Amino acid sequence: MSTWLIAPFSNNEFMRNALVAGILVSVLCAVAGTFVVLRGLAFIGDALAHGVLPGVAGALLLGVPGMLGAAVGSAVMIVGVSFVTNRSGLSSDTAIGLLFVGMLALGVIMVSRTDSFNGDIVRILFGEILGIRPRNIAVLAVAAVVVAAGVAMLYRPFLLLCFDPEQADVSGFPARRYHAIMLVMVATTVVVSFQAVGTLLVFGMLIAPASAGALLARRIWAMIAWAAGIGASSVYAGLLLSYHYDLSAGATVVFVTVCAFFVVLVVQLTRQSVSRQRLSRARGIGVS
């Protein structure tokens, strides 16, 4: 049994690199994803994850690093949403939906114009976690430190923004400014994580572990810790399953994280049901 659990990583450098990169992505997505869940930014997180597609496609066409293109795509998405919201009077959800569809369509158009994307499009959408190199791991590590440090410094305004934006304004933390900073944090996470799990799957890493953490904890740092632990465990389990059963590594990892959320949900619902039953019996005994 130990061979089944350990050998894939001890005998394979690609698997070891994937595990390290996956754990770093889990930490990044736990920090950013917690605020995505608490702030209700799931839609913009999804839009950012898909909106990087034309940027990455353009970068590959121009022969520049895909991460640079992803950063440009994320910046266009954030600036575009702010512009439409501020100038048109439409809701932010409407602006996000417009930019989301437009960026995704542009990415597909760019991909359809050339045959050179036959292999690259799969890598963009689903990542290449088994092709992670040491320099990618270094970028993920730096990003994880920067994002975690940023949240530590901005903990109070972020906390107020998530639960009472008006109180944030009153306390001297302009809600609009810190909302923009939070979006930049989410965009940074998406940009540096897409190489590992792809643009389609990074959203799952942002949402599923953080949502499970929200069910298990009531304090933000505890939620982040739970999310990071669940994400890292899912990376390990997903890589093992993909190795032994010849499955897509990135997709398997994300699928395991979603399954982990539902396991946590069922356990929590079961515990609540048992607690209610015990309380009902205790009240019945008290009445009698």
Image: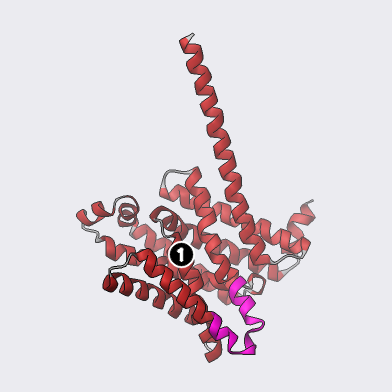
Q: Position of residue 100 (x, y in %)?
A: 45, 72
Query: What x and y, as percent, mark residue 198?
Result: 58, 71
| 117 in magenta | yes
Query: Dot 1 surroundings within 10 Å: few (below 14), some, or many (20 or more)?
Result: many
Q: Secondary structure at mark 1?
A: helix
Can residue 262 be seen in the rendering of this structure? yes
Is the magenta region chiefly helix, strand or loop? helix
Q: Name the residue at 79% across, 51% down.
A: 1
Residue at 50 percent across and 53 percent down: it is 210
**Where is 247 relative to 230, above or below?**
below
Q: On the picture, is 282 further left or further right than 156?
A: right
Question: Can you name the residue that lies furthest to the top here?
Answer: 288
Q: Is residue 147 left or right of residue 108?
A: left
What is the basis of the colouring in this image? secondary structure
Residue 184 at least partly seen:
no
Residue type at mark 1: give it.
Answer: Gly
The answer to whether residue 259 is above or below residue 114 is above
Question: Residue 264 placed where, x, y %?
Answer: 57, 44
Determine the residue positioned at 54% across, 85% down. Answer: 110
Give x and y (percent) for residue 212: 53, 49
Determine which quarter of the picture holds residue 251: bottom right
Residue named by callout 1: 45
Q: Using the rendered view, name the quadrant where residue 118 is placed.
A: bottom right
Residues in magenta? 108-126
Asked whether residue 26 is drawn in magenta, I would say: no
Total numbered labels placed on residues in the image:
1
